[in-house]
Amino acid sequence: MRNHNVASSYIGWCTAFAMILLGACAEDSTDSENTDTTGGETQSTEVTEETETETETETETEDNQSIVAVAEASGEFTILLTALEVAGLTDTLAEGGPFTVFGPPDSAFDMLPSGMLDGLLEDTELLTDILLYHVVSGEFYGEDVVNENLVTTLLGSDVAISVDDGDVYVNNAQVVTADVMADNGVIHVVDRVLIPPMDIATMVATDKQFSTLATALEVAGLTEALMGEGPLTVFAPTNEAFEALGEDTINTVLADQKLLQSILLYHVFNGRMVSGDLVEESSLEMMSGVQADVDVSDDGVSVAGSMVTAVDIPAANGVVHVISSVMLP
């Protein structure tokens, strides 16, 4: 009986000890599970925070709309953007500022005389000057611009601001869309490329369609004369007009400086004769001393038998009209 009690006590003690061990193991397992769960939550939280940070950064990048980014997004300034890249001004308008840009769209560049754009893209110094002539330091919104008479551009030259019957003009270019906002300034879309004041000789030398005329002026020693104060009106024949003379005639004229001078001066009027005044004249006394007849018909205006194909190209010292053939005195 005593042995049975001892055995029973021993079994009871072993059972109790086993239960204590099982309880301890259960607690350790629970703690371990809690620890793993907490660690997982921490890791998940960190991932979420990183994701949120990345999302915020992406949003900030998308919202960063510089003048260049706005121009790219619009799709109508491809030529302007190309010109900025060629001139090395892209980073300036993307990162600098604030600026006010009078932005000519592709349609404005298409209005330039044939060959002029190609010439500008090859003359980075002149191209840079023209582009800087479209940019003003600071932000001038539409309501501010109309209160200005002159605004100084980054080129250092002024552009004239005027209002006519509710329309706003920058020089002779109309503002067709105002206040296109960017993070580093504002764009006003204009319908023409703004050309800074340049003399007639420089304008002719810049425009590829007048390369033969530019050469002829140089050979005749008249380039500086067309850089003078003026005002002068030049009826400028294109390369095609010279080609129509034939190679032999061109070579003969280029070899005779006096003859060449008389022909070229027959294309120059001493004074500013814009198209509106030209049609009121019956003849003009050219700087060669010879009269050139002016004829107005249903076909257009001709001077000394040469059709005027483009009019009123402004220069600092006068105006240029493009003609279809070389005028011979």
Image (cartoon, rainbow, N blue to C red):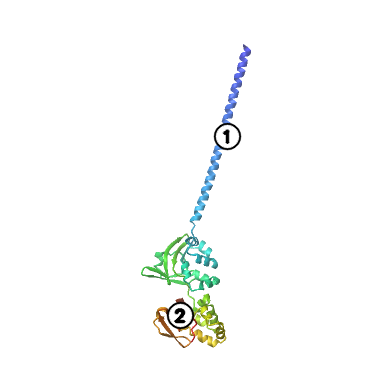
Q: Which mark is residue 307?
A: 2
Q: Residues within 10 Å of mark 1 (few under 14, many from 20)?
A: few
Residue at 47% across / 83% down in the picture? 268
Task: Return the residue at label 1.
Answer: 32
Instruction: Tell me if I can see residue 206 in this picture.
Output: no
Question: How many numbered marks have been drawn onto this rendered protein structure?
Answer: 2
Q: Nearer the viewer, mark 2 or mark 1?
A: 2
Residue 69: image location, x then y, percent: 50, 60
User: Do the residues bearing badges 2 and 1 touch, measured as CB atoms within 8 Å?
Assistant: no
| Extreme-right residue of the structure | 3
| Extreme-top residue of the structure | 1
Element at label 1: helix
Tell me which amino acid carries mark 1. Answer: Ser
Element at label 2: strand
Instruction: Tell me if I can see residue 127 in this picture.
Output: yes
| Extreme-left residue of the structure | 165
